[in-house]
Image (cartoon, grey):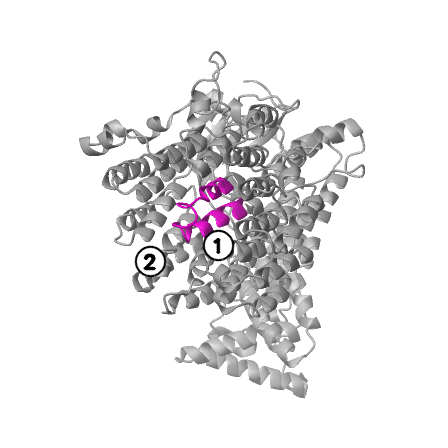
Amino acid sequence: MAPVPDPNNVGGGAKRDEATMKVPSKDPKKKDDKKEEDLSEEDLELKHNLELYVERVQDPNPELQKAALESMSLGFRLTGSGGDIGSWGHEYVRNLAGEIAEEYTMRQSEEASVEDLMDLVKQIVAFHMKHNAETEAVDLLMDVEDLDLLLEHVDRTNFRRTCNYLTSSAKFLPGPDDMLVLDIAYMIYIKFEEYPNALQVALFLDNMQYVKQIFTSCTDLLRKKQFCYMISRHGITFELDSEMVADKDDRDMLQDIVNNTKLSEGYLTLARDIEVMEAKTPEDIYKAHLLDGRASSGTSVDSARQNLAATFVNAFVNAGFGQDKLMTLPSDASSGSAGNWLFKNKEHGKTSAAASLGMILLWDVDSGLTQLDKYFHSTDNPVLAGALLGVGINNCGIKSDCDPALALLGEYIDNEDSSVRIGAIMGLGIAYAGSQNDQIRSSLSPILNDAKAPLDVIAFAALSLGMIYVGSCNEEVAQSIIFALMDRSEAQLGDALTRFLPLGLGLLYLGKQQESVEATAEVSKTFDEKIRKYCDMTLLSCAYAGTGNVLKVQDLLAQCGEHLEKGDIHQGPAVLGLAMVAMSEELGLDMAIRSLERVLQYGEQNIRRAVPLALGLLCISNPKVNVMDTLSRLSHDTDSEVAMAAIISLGLIGAGTNNARIAGMLRNLSSYYYKDASLLFCVRIAQGFVHMGKGLLTLSPFHSERLLLSPTALAGIVTLLHACLDMKSIILGKYHYVLYFLVLAMQPRMMLTVDENLKPISVPVRVGQAVDVVGQAGRPKTITGFQTHSTPVLLAAGERAELATDKYIPLSPILEGFIILKENPDYREE
């Protein structure tokens, strides 16, 4: 035997036969056994240790066996003479990797050198990467905090699997490791010119430098068009410059795609293909004829509340189709029905009615402004306010160089009538959400600190600023809102609308985690105690929205567990916060649903009112059966506020799905509550949600296979939910138009394929349930239970599409929204 305890013969000397470890038969160092005299003292000691270990390995006590085996492999590997690590097989290498992680942590705490370990790590990583064990290589490098090593070892064959694992594990890592992991994934994608994936990661990190780098590194104009579609879907404002695209005409064309100007056209192409262009009336949605006698007979009386509900249902159902039967004029009729419908609503109802026209003409800016123009000449303030809001809704998500919304709404911000001001302010908030437009800031900020301004105007100004600067951590806006909060009197702090101030503040930090929000959170501790905790909870939940941070979920759960006095309102946002933080990945989402069940059983009344809303947010546009049943149970609750929240949430989880089961539940509820105007109003709104866009829209803020979270979409949903925490004074009061904030989250749930000239083409695709294939061996199928359709197609929650033909190559690996196809040069017809 060789005197040095070599890893290749762990059995060692005469004890080999008794050793329980398997040894490769081709032993490179097999020589005649040397006499003991030749050994130096050190070697003798090692030999005795080894013999002791081998004895221990056979010891009946499993504890001793384990300790002996472990100290054998790593210790001997480090003292040994090296050699190829792989000849020992995978188990040995995996065992070593596990020990290195422990040893590394130990040495870090003792501040000892880790160089010898790192050399070994390099060998192990190289071995893992060669043998399809990318996940294990990544795990080891995370343990020894040296992910940069990956860049040297990835190659064309394994970089996709490696990056898949990196991006999916990022959700489960504490900060700042999560960002670091994504940085590495981005670098790997760039290295292999996999730009669409790199762009996704860049958007996830919200790193505009990275996005810019992708445009400058990629030279293919067609691929740049696809990037622009991806950016426009994410809903951020992005300006292309000459570095990114040199040619002026190309740049204008790409900027048009980023500005979302093609959205309306694509959506209507989908609608024509599915043949749902025919306008629907609220009666088509209510389907009252399917109910027993009593409810259907009672609805013939024209009540303002029911007309208002019909206005919303009509707006949501026909959203983006450009035609309906209440508001838009048929081309042949003179000013008949449309004028009348507006005046079937009471004062503030007219605001929502006029604004609904903007919703029906959603994304189609030219015809929207033409049709809304007639209301601008109205002397009736609520109608004017509605027209202003309508312009904002109509421009939602569509950017334009001439800024029509700002030009029209800017002059009304300081109107003497407060309803007109709110219309203009809210319109700007919706039209420019996420744009960080400084011109609007300079006109809205003064309102916040204007002592004469009414509370509702101030509340909406704070909210709109939060929307426009969502996730930007803008200090100046934060300052203005903080001062506005400090200036409120005792009486005003009790008002429901005051809650929009902390919310506007929270939106500035949406998803940005601790560092950014810390200073503001400190300041919020100085507020009046009525609002202090509310502000705290709102800031916390917004800052960690979509991060899945387990510790924050525990903090929020602890807040929900307290049994407090009646007057405390901060538990509502804590419950919503629970859903906001946990909604980012499936596992956390299921756990949050379970936790909310407990909260329902043990929580106080004010918490129970928020639970249905939290469930609605967790499963938005994704009707899970267990959540549907819980909400159905709560919709008959004895506390009418719980019932209202549950009904609205039934609408949210079914939003845009046309889900027949939810539609049936809501129909039954409409007959159950036919005498209670408020609850019936909520049922109608929920029915409008379920049939939103005739089933072509989704409210889910996630896209790109649930990786990316659109900040503006989440802002719109969260605003509505915060308003629903006090239904009676906001949604059922005169601020029902807050419902229109949902427009920020409304997106076609389509996949539309276009050719190189961006004209729609129809190709066969397979649509099925998405399967999580991260870390699986081989090339597993990514979808299951698929059906083959021809594009454009609708994608439900949790579904994924893949092309069923080799004739074209998609320019993005994620088939959602607009996908550019280029012809496959290698394709041969059968």
Q: Is residue 24 visible?
A: no
Q: Where is residue 578 in the image (x, y as percent from the top left)?
A: 45, 58
Q: Nearer the viewer, residue 219 or 380?
A: 380
For the C terminus, the quadrant is top right
The stretch of residues the image draws in magenta is 713-742
The residue tagged 2 is 597
Q: Which of 364 and 50 is in front in this view?
A: 364
Q: Which of 252 and 434 is in front in this view?
A: 434
Residue 217 position by quadrant: top right
Above or below residue 52? Residue 118 is above
For the N terminus, the quadrant is bottom right
Q: Where is residue 240 in the image (x, y as percent from the top left)?
A: 74, 38
Above or below residue 323? Residue 687 is below
Above or below residue 31? Residue 338 is above
Q: Is residue 793 visible?
A: yes
Label 2 and label 1: CA atoms lie apart by 16 Å
Total of numbered circles in the picture? Answer: 2
Label 1, secondary structure: give it.
helix
| Sequence-wise first label, 2 or 1 | 1
Residue 512 on the magenta span: no
Label 2, secondary structure: give it.
helix
The residue tagged 1 is 580
Quick one: label 2, few (<14), some, or many (20+) residues within 10 Å?
some
Q: Where is residue 491 in the image (x, y as percent from the top left)?
A: 48, 61
Mark 1: amino acid: Met
Mark 2: amino acid: Glu
Residue 728 on the magenta span: yes
Q: Which of 242 and 639 is in front in this view?
A: 639
Q: Position of residue 334 (x, y in %)?
A: 48, 14
Quick one: label 1, few (<14), some, or many (20+) residues within 10 Å?
many
